[in-house]
Image: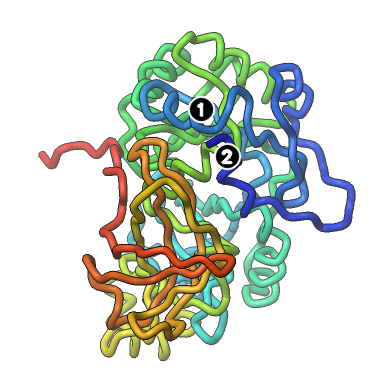
Amino acid sequence: METPLSETLLSETGERPLQLPLDAWHRARGARMVPFAGYEMPVQYEGIIAEHLWTRSSAGLFDVSHMGQLIVHGDQADAALESLLPGELKLLNDGRLRYSVLLDEDGGIVDDLMATRRGGHFYVVVNGATKHDDLEVMRLRLPRTVIDHMHEQALLALQGPRAVQVLERLIPGVAELSFMQGAAFTIAGKPAWVSRSGYTGEDGFEISIAASAAEEVAEAITADPFVKPIGLGARDSLRLEAGLPLYGHDLDRATTPIMADLGFVIGKRRRAEGGFSGALRILAELEQGAPQRRIGFTLDGRQPVREGARILDAEGNEVGRVTSGGFSPSLQRPIGMGYVATHLSEAGSVLMLEQRGKLFYATVAPMPFVPHRYHRKAAA
């Protein structure tokens, strides 16, 4: 059971991996380091299942400093970004985050990201493996907009039901943030941008600090007995249980937001006005449906089906592919995601999966597999 669920994440570029600001800190705590997104990153410390369950019950600290942190400047930064992203940014309040997708001209997904209005600019967090391509796309297509890559910033994610009480002790007032809201704070005497967000399905926070301050901040957070450092393996299994797609696996340029079941990223005004990359195709798919759709599925037994397995209909015809798969520590059963012909995407549909010549029966299941526990303030 300790075969890393993140094996599908690991990629070799042929170049020597870069080191995270906390590289020595991870190694001193017994982390198993692996190449991912051009960096050496911790895949596990105690074991993926133990780390997964600890995060679900307490609080886990993830080092996500490989992610790209960008600043988009200019009075018309919101309008510029709206030409590439389908979300509502012009009416986004200061300090509010928006999950969105960077689109190519055909409506394919170049990357998924978080965009935050911070006064006169936008703070954008993109995936580590795609950050340089994202920068190239944005600079090429937004020539009048200044885009800075924050090379000297680290990014930590504190996730889990005890995350808020842990961080409130270090940052008084941080508990006042609601899900998808951020603000400037000080932690361990260092300036930080903190948002109530993350990619595990749990309540939690992402903390952007100077790379030079990363070790001091990590030490301050993990000094709390409710916190343990958590690796990539558990991050992958947590996001899979939460039904959250991973770029390069569940999302790519061959998929549109409608195919990916991410129609919610297209704002109401944007649906009416268009004006974003690939709008003609995406708005047509919104109205008429897409040929394929991302689904979740469960299997009986304990054997997971991994990325790349073929999805078959009752007659044995290939109708899609598995894009993520693993064993759910919370549910104690195999789960996964993939794309199928839309007419086979209804919950309860039975599909066959073929992996290395062996057939498995899967049932289409609603996502998330494990309910999200984000902190949203009640309406006044």
**Mark 2 surroundings: few (<14), some (14-19) or many (≥20) residues within 10 A:** many
Q: Amino acid at mark 1?
A: Glu
Q: Secondary structure at mark 1?
A: helix
Tag 1 and tag 2, C-beta contact below 8 Å: yes
In the image, is 207 to the left or to the right of 131?
left
**Foreground: 50 or 185?**
50
Depicted 42 relative to depicted 72: above or below = above
Q: Circle 1 is placed at which residue position? A: 51
Q: Secondary structure at mark 2?
A: helix
**Foreground: 163 or 3?**
3
Image coordinates of residue 136 in percent, x first then y, are: 72, 69
**Foreground: 345 or 16?**
345
**Foreground: 371 or 315?**
315
Image coordinates of residue 369 in percent, x first then y, are: 31, 49
Q: Residue, x 37% and y 75% (percent of image)?
A: 293
Image coordinates of residue 207 in percent, x first then y, are: 53, 32
Depicted 347 relative to depicted 217: above or below = below
Q: Circle 2 is placed at which residue position? A: 233
**Mark 1 surroundings: few (<14), some (14-19) or many (≥20) residues within 10 A:** many
**Residue sticking out furthest to the left:** 380
Image coordinates of residue 238 in percent, x first then y, are: 44, 41
Q: Residue, x 42% and y 12% (percent of image)?
A: 169
Q: Residue, x 55% and y 53% (percent of image)?
A: 124
Q: In the figure, residue 148 lies in which quadrant?
A: bottom right
Tell me, yes or no, if residue 301 can be seen here: yes
In the image, is 233 to the left or to the right of 325?
right
Q: Amino acid at mark 2?
A: Gly
Q: Residue, x 53% and y 72% (percent of image)?
A: 109
